[in-house]
Image: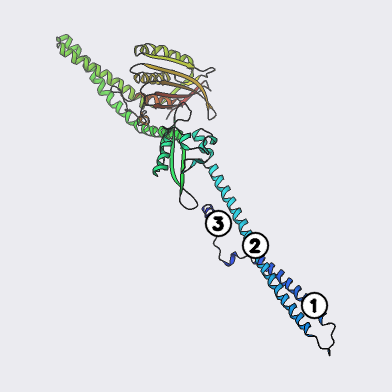
Amino acid sequence: MRECALLSDAAMFRPIPETTLFRRIPYRLIASVLLLLALVVSVLLLVSLEREKLLLQGFTEDAQAPTELFHALWQSRNELIAETLLVFLVSAIGIAAVMTFLHYDATRRTLEEVKGLARNILQSIPTGVLTINYEGTVSAMNPAAEVVLNRASSEFLGNGYDTVFSEKDPIRQILDGALKNHEHVSQRDVLYECGDPLPRTVRVGTAELTGDDKKAAGVILQLQDVTEWLALEQRVHVAEKLSALHTLSAGVAHELRNPLSAMDLNLHLLEEELKENGTPGKRGWQYLHVLNAECRRLCGILDNFMKFARPGTVGLHDINVQALIEHIMALMQFEAEERHVRLDHKVGKDLPAVLGDETQISQVLVNIIVNAFHAMPDGGLCHIAAVRREAEGKSWVEISVEDSGVGISQQELPRLFEPFYTTKSSGTGLGLAIAYRIMQDHGGTIQVSSIPGSGTTVVTQFPAAIDHAQRVATP
């Protein structure tokens, strides 16, 4: 049974060439043993002949051999037959022993090769793998799983999965379903708290683990950190939508600008005409006030349309980040006090200048801070932090805005940068879309992470200033 299992394992990793029964026979070994056996039999025959010659040496041709002589010769022949059979028996046992040893040695080498290959595969694959037996004990863990879970294998191996994963951990809940109810999952994304400030998204899959007897022996858990991949996918998705809407938004804004300007002009003329010819009454002035206010609001929306859709060049220069943040703090402090929000900031030491347009960067940060205020209707804390980061051989300045508000659901996060998508009743849905476009123009990034009920963190990254006279053309 063990031998069959080893051959089956070997077949999983490399094909075994088909061989016939006769090709498995070690011809050279058998030929060598037969030659040796023939040599031994020949020696025995020579010895027997010499013995008979010695017995007959004392008699002449006329002399009659005694009866005892024939009995001795017969006894000698019987001994020769017995010795020959014994030699054949020993030779057969020797051949069987040698063949068994060679087969065992080949099987053992195959087993070691299979074990080494399986170990190398497990160590090399980029997907995290854990094996858990039906007693709930973690029996194997590869280095990729250590990276995904941000924990050492010594914490897992030999321990129960219910002791290494907390009760509320989604991975433990998935393992409970797989081990207890045979409910397996495939590529399910879950939030995993691994000690980082923000939870990471881990793609989890489970499969049945079978033993040598082809019966279920446990569960295989597959893990893959897809946080960065999902963020990249989201950015590509948003970029595709923005690209499709750029031309449409520019055309709509241009076409609406002319009739809106005409309406605004004629409203002013009508107002002047009514003042000269008599008042239209209190209700009439209210109507005119509403029309003027709505025209101004439409003009503001069209301005946002143009900011969102207008491509062009952005003039960049060195910006002192600390001075910029202090200016924004002073600008937003009054509104923060009105909303009972504590606004504070922390700027890292030796922070390099940012290469960008100060007005546009201020617009991005003010927009993010205003959204943070709206997420804290009963007051709270809004913290702004600026630090230097090194990534991909480049220097970046990371500015994060963290609030203690109501948070954003996981279903809403992927749509935050979509134009016209808003969770506020009075919002236009263009604020974050414009911020996203500005960050693209500056060669930076913007990311949002949130836990419902625990607040939201918006992280922006700007390239550090390198060349003092640089202009970046945006597509």
Q: Left or right: where does residue 424 sit relative to residue 190?
A: left
Mark 2: amino acid: Ala
Indicate the position of residue 392 as horizontal and vertical percent values. Answer: 53, 30
- Crowdedness of circle 2 by 10 Å Cα count: few (<14), some, many (20+)? few
Quarter of the figure that contains the C terminus: top left
Q: Which mark is residue 97?
A: 2
Cα separation, mark 3 vs mark 2, equals 17 Å
Q: Which mark is residue 3?
A: 3
Q: Is residue 128 visible?
A: no
Q: Left or right: where does residue 282 sit relative to residue 323?
A: left
Give the SS element for disc 2.
Answer: helix
Looking at the image, residue 445 lies above or below residue 267: below
Q: Is residue 379 visible?
A: yes
Comparing labels 2 and 1, the label whose residue is closer to the camera: 1
Give the SS element for disc 1.
Answer: helix
Q: Which mark is residue 51?
A: 1
Q: Left or right: where does residue 305 sit relative to residue 466?
A: left
Instruction: Give the residue at x 17% y 9%.
Output: 276
